Image: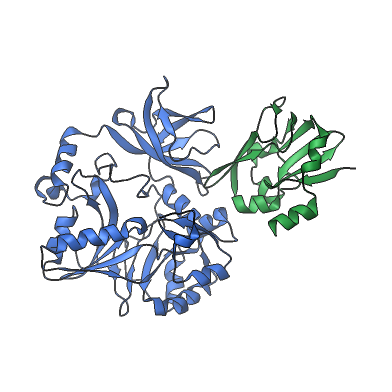
Chain colours: A blue, B green
Amino acid sequence: MDATNPGTLNTLPLFELHQAAKARFGGFAGWNMPLTYPLGVMKEHLHAREKAGLFDISHMKLILVTGPQAAAALARACPLAPEAIAISASKYTFLLNENAGIDDDLIVTRLGETRYMVVANAGNADQDAEKLTAVAADFDAKVEPLDRVLVALQGPKAEAALAAAGLDLSSLTFMHGTEPRENWFASRSGYTGEDGFEVAMPVAEAKDFVEKLLAHEDVEWIGLAARDSLRLEAGLCLHGNDITPSTNPVEANLMWAIPKSLRETGTFIGADALRAAIAGGPKRLRVGLKPEGRQPVRNGTVLTDADSKIVGEVTSGGFGPSVNHPIAMGYVEADLAQIGTTVYADVRGNKIPLAVHPLPFSQHRYRKG
Amino acid sequence: MATTYYTEDHEWLRVEGGIATVGITDYAQEQLGDLVFVELPEVGRTISKGDATVVVESVKAASDVYAPVDGEIVEVNQALSSEPALVNSAPAGDGWLWKMKLADESQLEGLLDEAGYNALIG
């Protein structure tokens, strides 16, 4: 797929709404996506933190897993205890490869005894659906990728704006989901660090609903550029940058997502390699990084110690409009991962110190109930 | 009387008495989005047409601004160190980038005038 040639990119079902909103588009994960709107990345970012930001994330994929052995199939595919998830609860999990590398990160919501909704990343969606389908072939379970429009509404006014558009999700707490209408799916989650929701709906019903949301005075479209700065401030990983098929959950510092019992006894794909990674301990760790001064340090920049020895790499880097300073995430050698440790980046000849910084950079404001 | 020229790389030059003030156009700042950092060159540096002279960084990415003609940098816009957003709010005014002493004024002949630039960006 050639991301620089719009001719080969997928088009969002609501493309015309974005065009009418004067979005600037660009290629991402095979999709022609709105990057910014006339408000601009800085104000869009702040709007999502202060009011309600509307994101079209229809490039991401919903995959429904159902059947008497749906839980067993998911327990094989992911380091997850699907039968232990309370109905309506959502869990963050992974598809691991045989080396325990992260092929994708997912949110799985249990909608019924034998009914689970998986939300997968755009760039990996086809591959994820294939893998889930292949795993499910050994079980009495069905895997069904769905065609939906998926939007996120994020920020302190999100709940009220959804209610005004006729969708009352006030009973959901953070990381819970439901099916509010036939063929709809909604969860209280998101990727900004704010309270908010993701709502999936049939394509034919999407335009009306989204226009109702946009009619609310607190709602503005937010593009992919601000989505990235919001998630980086929130310390959340971008698959393909911060976590990849060659990083495992131990070094990615994401072991909180894997139930303790499964670490020893789980039979999910990649379990043996994950146990070896746990036993060996991480050689490198994912950390937050705060560059000194005002100059951003970007993805791919090599990190060194004071003696110029290479000790790591930046995997996401930019500017945090809410914290008002450059922010970054990356990997450093495990013994340099303590908060406050200084590492260095060479940016066009300037040696910039970066402090290992706690994540998130801006406090999460989830509605935990 | 100052004369303003434009380049196909979306820069403007305001030339008066052999000194050119250089900035990026409104179109360019709009394309780049909100700037958060501007890396300025050293005064006294000699630059040739096409040299990466200034780096402007938006929330998302870094972009080079190239020297439109040959010359020597005589002043940089220090205000941008603390307020890079001036390039967005006043690209043709307070958001100027650097001033340079022209080495060869005949190079200006190859640049665009306002009408030519407006035709370029459509």
Q: In this view, does A14 lie to the left or right of A332?
A: right
- Residue furthest to the right in view is B1
Nearest the eye: A120 or B78: A120
Q: Residue A158: image x %, image y %?
A: 44, 67
Q: Which residue: 18% across, 38% down?
A: A278
Q: In this view, does A243 lie to the left or right of B77?
A: left
Q: Which residue: 19% across, 64% down?
A: A86
In the rendered image, the quadrant that contains the N terminus of chain A is bottom left
Q: Residue B65: image x %, image y %?
A: 64, 40
Is the residue A353 above or below the residue B117 in the image? above
Quarter of the rendering containing residue A199: bottom left
Q: Which residue: 82% across, 36% down?
A: B106
In the rendered image, the quadrant that contains the C terminus of chain A is bottom left
Q: Residue A118: image x %, image y %?
A: 26, 63
Quarter of the rendering containing residue A339: top left
Can residue A364 be seen at all in this image of the molecule? yes
Can residue A288 be seen at all in this image of the molecule? no
Q: Residue A239: image x %, image y %?
A: 35, 50
Nearest the eye: B15 or A297: B15
Is the residue A151 above or below the residue B81 in the image? below
Q: How many labels does the image show?
A: 0
Is the residue A299 above or below the residue A67 in the image? above
Is the residue B91 above or below the residue A59 in the image? above
Q: Which residue: 72% across, 49% down?
A: B90
Quarter of the rendering containing residue A204: bottom left
